[in-house]
Image (cartoon, grey):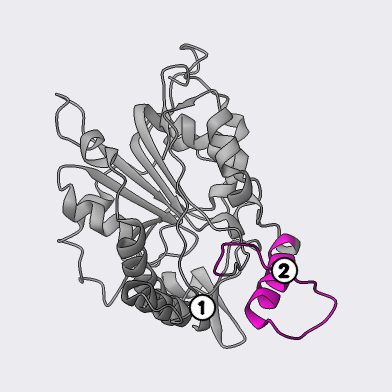
Amino acid sequence: MVYPHDPYTDYYDDEESDIDEYESISSLPLFSPPPSVSGSSQTSYDVSMRSGSPTPSVFSMSSSVRAQAVRQEFGRAINNYSEVYRLPADDEELDRLDQQHEMFKECLGNYPHPMSEIMADDVPGEIKAVLDLGCGSGGWILDVARDFPHCQAVAVDLVPMQSLSEVDDINLGLEHFYGDFNVVHAQLISSGIKDFYNLLDHITKVLRPGGLAILVEWDFNAYNVDHERIEVSTHEVKEPWWPRWLAFCKIAIKESGGDVDAADNLREWTNNHPALEDVTYEEFWIPSSGWSEDEFQKRMGATMGIDICV
């Protein structure tokens, strides 16, 4: 979790489901005006930096919109807007992401400690705002909307995976969000990001002073019980299967343009970024199957095994 300082001043069932309960998700103007380019150089930017978005940025969920957002490959629905992110975007994937979200809540906790303080409704005239980049099934941002009902919550993904979300490719930039949010959350999105450090730089400008960035990534490697990396080649196909599969997966992601090295570099990037301070780095270890004798680890490992296989 990292903080900026002043120098860088569906899930859908039908059209009506959950819209009233989670209305705060769509209450923030999704394209707020950018900071004035005539103001301080600390907060201004050149709008020409942003490429034209390949798709309208706000969708209301309907079957026709859903059909336009995805295409079929090997019996699964794949997003229709980015060749970088290649995981499915269908009901089966929604179920997997929901279960993954619940697992991570138990293992990592849903929010880091400063979240409640930063999201407190204690600044007259300011409505606290949260942005979830690569929201998936929307589990995390929906929790935010429930737990902080005074806030404005915005979810962004390549596919309208829930009834209220913005469809956008964040590889194109985040200039339209500069200075708008107190918290930015991005979890397990590096496989679909071309340049993660560039995204980090954008996030620092999206955050208001004193805000919080929550970045969660993994390194696409398997480890033994002593937390030593299991090194395998891709010149042969044999046991150990899980580390071998991950090795091939990393190659496929790199060839598609994803940044598989982001997790390895994230600590250095955040510690050395001039706009960030009070950086906290934590590592969490989750078994990939239910082999552990510890009951909690065994249960989490079994859940992770299902997440991997699905």
**Residue in the foreground of this view, choosing between 100 and 184:** 100
Which amino acid type is shown beneath numbered disc 1? Ile
Magenta residue check for 5? no
Q: Which mark is residue 252?
A: 2
For numbered disc 1, what is the local secondary structure? helix
Q: Residue at x 35, y 62 (%)?
A: 107
Magenta residue check for 232? yes
Vertically, is 42 above or below 130? above
Q: Which mark is residue 112?
A: none
For numbered disc 2, what is the local secondary structure? helix
Q: Which mark is residue 308?
A: 1
Residue numbers of the magenta segment: 225-254
Q: Position of residue 255 (x, y in %)?
A: 76, 63
Q: Residue at x 60, y 60 (%)?
A: 191
Vertically, is 287 above or below 123? below
Kindly tell me whether residue 62 is visible in this rendering: no
